Amino acid sequence: MTQALEDLLDLLDLERIERDIFRGRSRSAVVPRVFGGQVAAQALVAAGRTVPEDRFAHSLHAYFLRAGDPDAPIVYTVDRIRDGRSFTTRRVVAVQHGQPIFHLSASFQTYEEGMDHQAAMPAAPDPETLPTAAQTLPAHLDGRVDPGILERLLQTREAVDLRYVDAPPFASVGEPREPRSQVWFRTNGKLDGAIDEPLLHVCLATYVSDMTLLDSVLLAHGRGGWVTGDVVGASLDHAMWFHRPFRADEWLLYDQESPSASGGRGLGQARIHTRDGRLAITVIQEGVVRVPRSD
């Protein structure tokens, strides 16, 4: 396990300060706000720690309300909405400086047999044949962005081995492309021992899911996003459905597309498949996607 992955796992190991109240820290941010995937993952950790061990997370729905302060702790308050025979529902509010910055509802279910079908996995090259983010990012951004931004961007990728199937949006500014993108990802190290639990794999996938989902919006317009400064953006809401068991330390294909952008907002939707073709997760996110004014 890499030190970066250990640091990420430590970030997700919230401090319990009351029965249903938890406190989390933040890591250095690329932009002056807390990374949305971190807040979502931490909120899901908080919810999961109030749920019986025999129930697994099957969905989450969240809203990003305010930009988080990376220099201040985040307090997560869990509301035990319902404990049914098969399903458990939790609501989590993340607070900083006395104000809510994030709201999440999550549902957990006991395992049961049922009907089973899925969409086919799309074609994609083997992840081992693709360059790592540590190779891709400098190749396209060195000399084009502030060195500090590139360094912090690389730091956010150290815990996760993320590999672009095609060139990312910041590599093809001014060249509109089909609004679809693919990345392979897995943690940079194996999860085992006491930390190897289903909830942690789900929370790690939640963390990664906010990294690239709106890339397909940018591709449709030949924009590089906040990295190149030609778009101002932020996540608005985020929803995930966890269909089948998976491991975050094994390769997952994140197949993303954007069906619409309008009114200063862009929509991304995606499916995440395991390497052997099982549909593990469906993700939908809407975000602010604004072109900065020139005047």
Image (cartoon, helix red, strand yellow):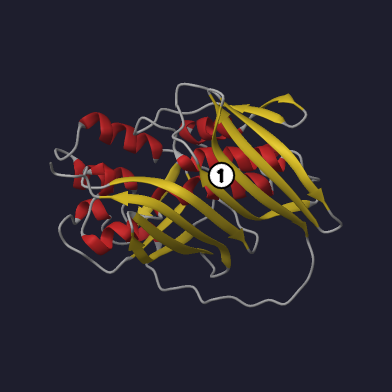
Q: Nearer the viewer, residue 162 or 263?
A: 263
Residue position marked by numbered label 1 in the rendering:
190
Q: Secondary structure at mark 1?
A: loop
* Relative horizontal placement of residue 39, taking residue 184 as reference (left or right): right
* Circle 1 crowding by C-alpha within 10 Å: few under 14, some 14–19, many from 20: some
Name the one closer to the observer, 176 or 1: 176
The answer, for residue 288, to whether it is visible in the render is yes
Q: Is residue 254 left or right of residue 216?
A: right
Q: Residue at x 37, y 34 (%)?
A: 155
Q: Is residue 132 left or right of residue 15?
A: left
Residue type at mark 1: give it: Lys
Residue at figure coordinates x 31%, y 43% from the top left? 134
Check the image and report above or below for 107 versus 116: above
Residue 94 placement: quadrant: top right
Residue 192 in view of the camera: no
Looking at the picture, does residue 256 appear above or below residue 228? below
x and y percentages locating residue 229 in the rendered image: 22, 42
* Figure check: 104 above or below 174: above
Q: Residue 129: give x, y in percent of width and height.
A: 34, 60
The residue that appears at 76% across and 57% down in the rendered structure is 109
Question: Where's the C terminus, which quadrant?
Answer: top left
Image position, residue 54 (x, y; %): 80, 51
Residue 76 placement (x, y as % from top left): 63, 32
Query: In terms of depth relative to the viewer, which is nearer, 121 or 271?
Result: 271
